Amino acid sequence: AALRRFVMALDGLSGVVHGLEFQARALAAQGGEPASEHPRFIVGTQTLRNENQLQVLEFDDENDTIESRVYGHPAGEFWGLHPNPQRADLLLARISPTSGPKRINAVLYGLPPFEEENGQLINHTELAHDSDVCCAAWHPNKVSVGATAEANALHLWDFEMEHKTATINTTASLDHGCEAVRWSPHHNGSTFGTANGCSVQIWDARTLKKSHCIERAHDGGVRELDFNPNKQYYLATCGNDGKIKFWDQRTANAPLLVLSEHTHWVWSVRYNHFHDQLVLSSGSDNSVVLSNVASLSSDIYGDVGGGDGDDDDDDDAGRSSSPSDEKRLQTDGRIALFEEHEDSVYAVEWSAADPWVFASLSFDGRVVINRVPRDVKYDILL
């Protein structure tokens, strides 16, 4: 375990910086049970010359400190981290061995409790694939269901948790590979989306059949996608064109909104879990952007955090905003620019424990934990 603290202030914004020993691109927020009162993030390194590390970071918001648990990982480099949303001790990781065939594999690990300072990673099982595992995701509600994608195939997996084994339930073919997979939290997780080349496919998880398609979503390729947690048909995408686009999957012939806040590829986009007008993005321009998407937010009508978000556009069209709503009808666009990185920022994630805290990771191994600016927070709450 290590305790490191560094605070950087920039234009009135401050972030707490944690430096890894090696390069890295894999970052995830840890949630699940047992829940932590402090934000926790998981990062994994990429080095061919040294033993790689998996680190679990806990952020103390009152003291602006980060406490870490460091686990050696001689098995190889981390390309992706996917914590189980129901259980804090389960982690699906995409790793590339440092010796032997350089194929990226998917492995289910067991994480020790954070309070256990000398704990060890447990390798439960490897998920068999024929080629590189491009991406992975867990079902949002079912602890034993997950998805992975390789070059030409998409798989749904059933995990047997008692013996920590995994078997393929259903497989579908892919035409253009897969850059990302993201599960929708609505309708009990019955749909998920994939980024396939320049397009986005929406899948019925019950049949593994395509239900919707967003063609030519981004010139040069789609890098990531995320579903609005409060509005069931809405999603955000980002790509190599440097843009973030917002869609209604039912009428996906054109985006509802386009933000051009980055000057290079955008690697990651994430909705805030509760306040869906807040959207994070990160890119190869070394920056993290916090954007306001008020015009497409459930909060316009005071719906934030409300149930399954099963709103209907026909109902919305007939409503008018009251004077109290006007405060929240802000201009879409950038709220804050965070420039504490000096390399491509491959990932940004909201905390699972605190809706105002988020972390970002750049390839040089710098993790920055930041907060939503205070005036923005109180504008939303009040």
Image: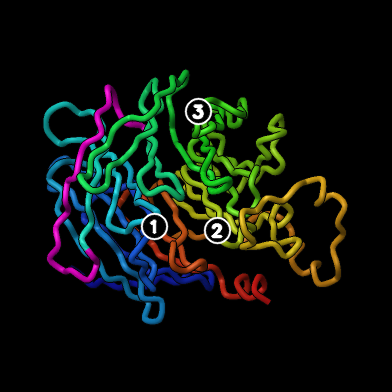
Residue 193: x %, y % from top left: 52, 36
Q: Secondary structure at mark 2?
A: loop
Q: Nearer the viewer, residue 244 or 249?
A: 249
Q: Is residue 345 visible?
A: no
**In the picture shown, does residue 73 fall above or below 302?**
above
Percent coordinates x, y for residue 44 in the rendering: 27, 50
Q: Is residue 83 above or below residue 133?
A: below
Residue 325 position within the rendered picture, expressed as x and y whole percent measured from the top left:
79, 67
Question: What numbered label is drawn on residue 272?
Answer: 2
**Residue 108: quarter of image:** top left
User: Residue at image x 33%, y 47%?
Assistant: 81
Is residue 203 toward the left or the right of residue 61 in the image? right
Instruction: Give yes or no for contact between labels 1 and 2 (Cβ–Cβ under 8 Å).
Output: no
Amino acid type assigned to the residue bearing label 1 in the image: Ala
Q: Mark 1 = which residue?
A: 29
Percent position (x, y) of residue 245?
63, 41
Task: Assess disc 1: are there few (<14), some (14-19) or many (≥20) residues with their C-alpha within 10 Å of its C-alpha.
Answer: many
Disc 3, SS:
loop
Counting residues from the start of the chain, the first of labels 3 and 2 encountered is: 3
| Image quadrant where one finds the N terminus | bottom left
Identity, as a three-letter code, of the amino acid under mark 2? Asn
Q: Nearer the viewer, mark 3 or mark 2?
A: 3
Residue under numbered circle 3: 207
Q: Main secondary structure of the magenta part?
A: loop
Q: Which residues are magenta?
A: 113-134
